[in-house]
Image: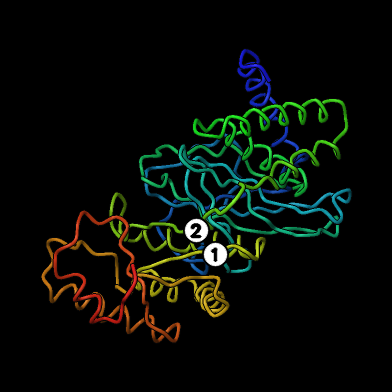
Amino acid sequence: MEHRFHEPVRRRLAQMAVPLLALARPEAVAPDRLLVSERTGRIGWDAAQELTYRDAELGETFGPEWATYWFRVEATIPESWAGACVELAWDSGSEATLWRDGEPLQGLNAGATARRTEARLAGAAAGREQVAVMVEMACNSWMGAADPVRLERCGLVRFDPEAWKTAWDFEALRQLEGEPDLEPAWAGHLLAELNRFCAAWDTGHRGAAREILAGLLAHGNPGHVHRMTAIGHAHLDTAWLWPLAESRRKVIRSFANQLALMDRYPEHRFAASSAQHYAWLQEDAPSLFARVRERAREGRWEVVGGAWVEPDCNLPSGESLVRQLLYGQRAFERWFGRRCREYWSPDTFGHNGQMPQILRGAGIDGS
């Protein structure tokens, strides 16, 4: 493809990305009933059942910052959705947690840097069944400062996994084409094939279009290449720009999200540090804690770090750092049957010269 045609094709690819993603959730229905509680603080499921509730409407605003409201959502899955995957769609521009029958299912977030506004409710719906869930809505974004919070969206959506896969396969390849250091011949072939995908898709040849994407994704480099493995991680500051009590809720949201991803994608792996976070999870959401332990036994959840929290490694005394690892390793051995061998401290601002000796004394020989 001649260079002068590159930019028009790229504009075409960008225009294609939006409708492709929309096909992943082609239908939506409003809830039968939406109720909201009185303003409250950081309370648990049981306490939330005792609150006073009233009818709520989309477009309502809530506050002040750091306040909490609980919502009851009742809905009916359409009969025509039988056999389909069904999700709850929720957008309050803030952090929230989806609950069902007293158990946290997933964190929800609609911030500027990350959006997770849907949560799976049924993998294969029967049709016409009733859905009853609760949403614990926090009046803050992940960094605070979300006052007032506005409820923009709440309802059920039908999810099409094949359309979702097509949209993100296309988007991954489209972003790859934009990388500046691609080998020129491969870059030109990639752009031409993505343009051919658009032509096939627009003319209704969806199967042929998907085959084009599959061929591009199967492309490999010649000769010897490095093997790379990606493991998910959610760096969670135990105390930073939010109250300490909010960190406990962030642990539930973060860990619930990863467990939900593991249910959908058996190949997914996740690593998390800080014994303090696991201790909070054991106390606040024991069912999630039990699932984390099971995933760790399966080798899908990596427990790393060895310390009670990820500490500063410059100002604390050697005794303080030793105790971080002493109490952390004791806890991990009690919960998971082994000590951590990998040190994990991605957000520290330097390490003192005694760290290798301290880590080796705690049984850590990797980093």
Above or below, 247 relative to 188: below
Q: How crowded is mark 1: few (under 14 residues within 10 Å), some or many (20 or more)?
A: many
Front residue (pair 363, 42)? 363
Q: Return the mark for residue 304.
A: none
Q: Return the mark for residue 232.
A: 2
Q: Residue at x 80, y 52 (%)?
A: 77
* 155 sits to left or right of 52: right
Q: How far apart are marks 2 and 1 (CA)?
A: 6 Å
Which amino acid type is marked by label 2?
Answer: Gly
Q: Is mark 1 on a helix, strand or loop?
A: loop
Q: Position of residue 141 (x, y in %)?
A: 42, 44
* 145 sits to left or right of 269: left
Cβ atoms under marks 2 and 1 closer than 8 Å: yes
Above or below, 156 relative to 320: above
Residue at mark 1: 269
* Residue at far front of view: 223
Q: Which residue is drawn at 24% across and 75% down?
A: 359
Q: In which quarter of the image is residue 148?
A: top left
